[in-house]
Amino acid sequence: MTPGCISASTEADARTTEQASAYRNFDHLSIRSMLRVMNREDRSVARSVGRALPEVERLAEAIYRQMNAGGRLFYLGAGTSGRLGIVDASECPPTFGVESGRVVGLIAGGDAAIRKAVEFAEDQPDGGWNDLQAHHVGSGDVVVGLAASGTTPYVVGALAECRRRNIPTGCITCNQNSPLAAQADYPVVVVVGPEVISGSTRLKSGTAQKFVLNMLTTTVMVRLGYVRGNRMVHMQLSNNKLWDRGIRMLRQEYPITEAEARRLLNIHGSVDAVMRQLESQPPTGPNAPH
C-alpha cells in the first residue's frame, strides 16, 4: 500500500493552514479584542465555502447517486476532522430517520479518539483502509476523506486504496494542491487562510468543514426523500421536544386534535407514516366532497 504523505517542514510552511496569522501579539489582547478578531475571521469562512460550492455540488451529487442505489457514505478523518465527521454521521439517523449504518464516521485511533487524542494514529497510512475494511466497504459506497491539511497519512492512504479498488471518493480540505485532493474523485477545497492561532485547524478550517458536511448530508437526505417541504418528517421521536414537534407538524397540516396526533404517532412511529396514512383515507366531515 502506498505510504501517506509525511510533509517536510518546508512543505508545511507552504500550507495555508500552517502559516502564521497576522495576529502575532494575540496573547496580549483583551478578551473583548480577541473575540472581535475571531468573529471577524469567522465571517470570512462562509465566503470561502461559497467559492467552493461547485465542488460541493459535484460531491453531493456523487454521494446521492451511490446512496440512492443502496450504498453507504463513509467519513474518514483524524483529530478535529474525524470528530466532525462522526458528529455529522451520528446525527443523520435521529434527524432524518435514515437507517443506522448508512452514514458512518471513522476516526484514526478508533472511538477512544473521539474524546482523547490517540498519539500517532493519524500517521499510519494503512490505518484508514483497515478501518474501512472492517465495514466491508465496496464500490457501491462512497468514502469522503476529511483533513484540513490534506496530508494526513491515515486519510490519504485510505483514499489511494479506494481509488485502486474503484470505490468513489471525495474529500474536504483547506489547502490547495494537497495529496488528499489528488487522490479524491470529487475534491472540495475550501481555503480559509491562516488561523488566528497558527495551525489550530479546529478554528476556521473546522468551521468550514462543518459547513460543507451540513450541506452534503442535508441536500442528499432531502433528495433521498427524508424531508417533506422543509420538515424532518422521518425524524426519530426520541424525546419530548421531538414529540411536540411531530404533533405540531401534523396539526398544521390536518384538522386533528393534539390527542389524535399523539395517538397516530404512537401507532405509526413517524410523522411521515402518519401523513401517508391520513392522505390515503377518503376525506370526511362537512367539507368533504359528495
Image (spheres, grey):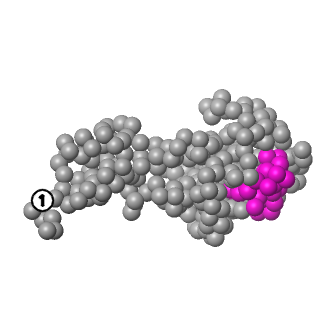
Please, is residue 170 above or below residue 74 in the view? Answer: below
Residue at 42% from the left image edge and 49% from the top image edge: 234
Residue bearing mark 1: 285
Residue 220 placement, left or right of 201 = left
Q: Looking at the figure, which quarter contains the C terminus?
A: bottom left
**Front residue of this view, candidates 1 and 224:** 224
Taking depth in this image into account, of 198 and 260 the one nearest to the observer is 260
Judge by depth and name the residue closer to the eye, 143 or 140: 140
> Is residue 105 positioned above or below 207 on the image?
above
| Residue at the image point whose x is 15% and y is 65% from the top | 288
Question: x, y percentage for residue 139?
Answer: 74, 52
Residue 29 at x, y percent in the picture: 57, 49
Q: Which amino acid, mark 1?
A: Gly
Magenta stretch encompasses residue 183: yes
Q: Do we see residue 212 in this rendering?
A: no
| Picture quadrant of residue 154 | top right
